[in-house]
Amino acid sequence: MLDLMISTKATEKLGMAIEDGQFIELAVDRPDAPQLVDSIFLGKVITVDQSLQAAFVDIGQPQLAYLEKNQIPEARKDREKSIESFIYEGQAIIVQVIKDAYQNKGARLTMNIALANQVFVYLPFGNYIAVSKKLSNEEGTALKAKLKDICQGEEGLIIRTQAKQYSIDELINQIQQLRTSWQEVLAIEKDSTVPETLRAECAVSDRFIRRFPFQQINQIICDQAITANQIKKRYPELKAKVKWRQQLVDYLPLPIDESIQQILNPVVQCDQGVTIEINQTEALTVIDVNSAGFLGKINRHHFAYKVNRIAADTIARQIRLRNISGIIIIDFLRMKEKKHRTKIIEQLIEAFKVDPTRTEVYGFTAVGLLELTRKRETPIHHMTFTSSRSKEVALSQVSIVYTLERELLANQDQAVIVEVTKGFRQVWDQWINLDDFLENVSSDVYFIETKGVKDYHIKRSGTEQLITEYIKENEQLNIDKIK
């Protein structure tokens, strides 16, 4: 069973999935790298590029978003026509983000809008009904027959695996809810000016929750009552499982910041002394299997196969936990027998079945490297948490600011004094919403700007009297109360 932890109190919003006492997935949403997948915008077409057969669209983000011709509903009806036949520069269009901005590339868009819940993906312009591949042919055919007359006009549906657990009346009600959501988007669009957000999907309290089968969720614990109430309202079937607790730390197998550091560590320990090393670049991710510490006893002819079997499941878990996407190359120990290579491929394919993000395993190359790809929707965690183009695995200053914020929000003392550098304070002022912070923090917080620390240091924490006495004794210091 899964426990989902939803942290929205701090500026950096986090969704954490825990199974058998281990983190299996992490979702991150932060103002310096917002996640917009599934959000719907009224955008303005800035440029229509004939050579690319694509358009660049302003959706109110720092970078122009990218819309290909094949993502325009009308283009499906006549594929011979050029993109200029469907949209023009200066036009206002309703678009949805299908892939977040990545490095210097803007977000990718579609005009084939999709609204999802646990049962369906509703397609206002889909004009077809499809079923999940996880449903049997008999189940899929039966559901399609029941729902074929429900769609109106150009509406379409993708029937998800969970649909088989609902009655026909419940299914119709679910479709109507999604249809109503789309009508609400259209109503907002009528009174909007471009660019405008028409429907915002929260990465950690909405899209993250929908990634998991609801019947597998044991509980959802939120650190804000408002977030818990929003989840209950949007997903009434989860109402009994949603709880509000002021501090999530008591329910986590590891503190959040320690977990993030583990995600950034390139070396991961597997069973029996086997390790893997994960090296991430802008172009691809390379994973190396290391047997130097192997403690098992095995026939030397099967040594490589045994080590690779141990490493394979860990590799699949780490790819999901770290949100690694794009091209992935795995350097397994060389196996001479073809049947062993085939079994490793089958093991990985089976391990990736529990990952909601699609992964394709292509097989071994001539030089013995395994190739696979994982669909890229949101930024790799390594790119989010670390400094841009950093050669060392180190948190960026924005990440360290969020770390201090979490530490202060968890502090139960009456007052705390923090030494910070001038640069750190500037980043704090840029990314921390003061009103939200003061509403959630229980301590009086004081900053001292100094050159004598790296980023920040908790100087004093305790009673109000203790801090007041310290301030009186150090009047020469520029002690600034956060207020």
Image (spheres, rainbow, N blue to C red):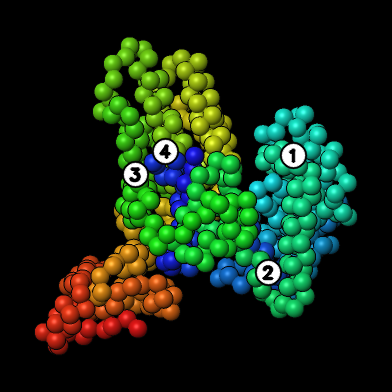
Q: Earlier in the sequence, mark 3 or mark 1?
A: 1
What x and y, as percent, mark residue 70? 75, 52
Does residue 217 appear anywhere in the picture?
yes
What is the CA distance from the residue labelled 1 to the residue labelled 2? 28 Å
What is the CA distance from the residue labelled 3 to the residue labelled 1? 39 Å
Give the residue at mark 1: 131
Q: Earlier in the sequence, mark 4 or mark 1?
A: 4
Looking at this view, is 354 or 343 the one in front? Answer: 354
What x and y, as percent, mark residue 402? 37, 65
Amino acid residing under circle 1: Val
Amino acid residing under circle 3: Pro
What is the CA distance from the residue labelled 4 to the residue labelled 2? 39 Å
Q: Where, by quadrant of the figure, is residue 205 drawn? A: bottom right
Where disc 1 sits, the SS reads: strand
Looking at this view, is 10 or 328 the one in front? Answer: 10
Farthest front residue in view: 240
Give the residue at mark 2: 198
Where disc 2 sits, the SS reads: strand
What x and y, as percent, mark residue 62? 55, 71
Where disc 4 sits, the SS reads: loop
Q: Where, by quadrant of the figure, is residue 420 drawn? A: bottom left
Q: Where, by quadrant of the figure, is residue 14 drawn? A: bottom left
Give the residue at mark 4: 20
Q: Earlier in the sequence, mark 3 or mark 4?
A: 4
What is the CA distance from the residue labelled 3 to the residue labelled 2? 40 Å
Q: Is residue 105 above or below residue 197?
A: above
What x and y, as percent, mark residue 349? 54, 30
Does residue 108 appear anywhere in the picture?
no
